[in-house]
């Protein structure tokens, strides 16, 4: 995997990653990281991609992993950033995959990339705020995202004393973090070197108008959701699946917010074949 810095027209810099398979590339995939992470694709993602001939590229969103900050960004701004990274790497068409906080940004890439976006997968991705269902119901610790509705200053103040609530994860999540997805916990730990601005800006973007509507996402979307998720409750996924023009919902009843990532290999197969694979 190579790392590079991509300079943008507005003077910002994005720290990016590119991993090419050893065999011929069958698909190019933009990986959108969760909140907080460094932007580097996680080891199980790279391993699943390598055996399938999938090229994976990614970048650290603003204020993460060495990328320049962009306070006030909305979710839609991720589209211009991922396109800039794709252009720097000589990539034309690509699919998007985002986990947790990366899910909305993967959707943004499809909404704004036109024919270059060939498909999207979201795993445990939060929905845009709506009153069509109880958006907060089922969240074990809604205070962080709740403070973001009061603005960036309020969300930043909350983060100064925030502590992780272990009730947000179920047993399957802890098993995943101890096993196949241990690299996720390691990457979250490394992300602390760049502070909390990226996380704060993500939450404010999620709590604000996204800058695009779900009806603008024209590429096929696979919405993957754990039925036991206590960070992003299942109602977010079911509502998004109904609201997107072309969506398939995989509800995994025994998964939480982290263990749902076990669906990544099957989701890659869905992108490759265009049919539901379980």
Image (tube, helix red, strand yellow):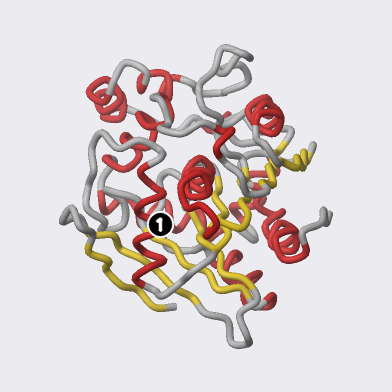
Residue 198 x, y percent position in the rendering: 31, 43
* Disc 1 target residue: 82
Eyeballing the image, is 192 above or below 23?
Answer: above
Residue 206 x, y percent position in the rendering: 43, 30
User: In this image, 68 relative to 271: left or right?
Assistant: left
Q: Secondary structure at mark 1?
A: helix
In the image shown, does 247 or 173 lie closer to the viewer?
247
- Residue at 39%, 53% (x, y): give it: 189
Residue 58 sits in quarter: bottom left
- Residue at 51%, 55% (x, y): give it: 184
Q: Residue furthest bottom?
A: 23
Residue 135 x, y percent position in the rendering: 57, 18
User: In this image, 208 relative to 46: left or right?
Assistant: left
Alpha-carbon neighbours of circle 1 within 10 Å: few (<14), some, or many (≥20)?
many
- Which quarter of the rendering shows the N terminus? bottom left
- Residue at 29%, 49% (x, y): give it: 62
In the image shown, does 93 or 72 lie closer to the viewer?
93
Total numbered circles: 1
Residue 46 x, y percent position in the rendering: 57, 70
- Residue at 47%, 67% (x, y): give it: 57
- Which quarter of the rendering shows the C terminus? bottom right
Q: Residue furthest front?
A: 115
Eyeballing the image, is 110 above or below 89?
Answer: above
User: In this image, 223 relative to 43: left or right?
Assistant: right
Eyeballing the image, is 250 above or below 144?
Answer: below
Residue 151 sits in quarter: top left
């Amino acid at each position: 995997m190579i790392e590079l810095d991509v300079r943008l027209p507005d003077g910002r810099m994005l720290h990016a990653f590119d991993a090419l398979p050893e065999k011929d590339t069958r698909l190019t995939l933009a990986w959108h990281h969760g909140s907080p992470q460094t932007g580097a694709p996680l080891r199980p993602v790279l391993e699943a991609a390598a055996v399938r001939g999938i090229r994976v590229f990614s970048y650290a969103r603003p204020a993460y992993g060495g990328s320049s900050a962009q306070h006030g960004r909305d979710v839609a701004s991720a589209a211009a950033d991922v396109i800039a990274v794709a252009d720097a790497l000589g990539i034309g068409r690509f699919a998007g995959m985002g986990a947790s906080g990366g899910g909305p940004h993967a959707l943004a890439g499809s909404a704004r990339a036109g024919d270059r976006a060939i498909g999207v997968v979201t795993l445990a991705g939060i929905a845009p705020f709506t009153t069509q269902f109880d958006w907060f119901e089922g969240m074990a610790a809604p205070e962080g995202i709740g403070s973001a509705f009061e603005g960036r200053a309020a969300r930043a103040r909350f983060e100064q004393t925030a502590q992780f609530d272990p009730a947000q994860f179920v047993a399957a999540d802890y098993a995943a973090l101890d096993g196949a997805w241990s690299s996720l916990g390691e990457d979250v730990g490394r992300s602390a070197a760049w502070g909390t601005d990226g996380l704060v800006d993500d939450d404010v973007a999620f709590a604000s108008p996204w800058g695009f509507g779900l009806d603008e996402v024209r590429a096929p979307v696979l919405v993957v959701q754990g039925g036991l998720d206590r960070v992003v409750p299942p109602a977010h996924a079911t509502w998004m699946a109904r609201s997107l023009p072309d969506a398939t919902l995989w509800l995994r009843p025994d998964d939480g917010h982290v263990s749902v990532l076990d669906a990544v290999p099957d989701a890659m197969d869905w992108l490759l074949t265009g049919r539901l694979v379980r």
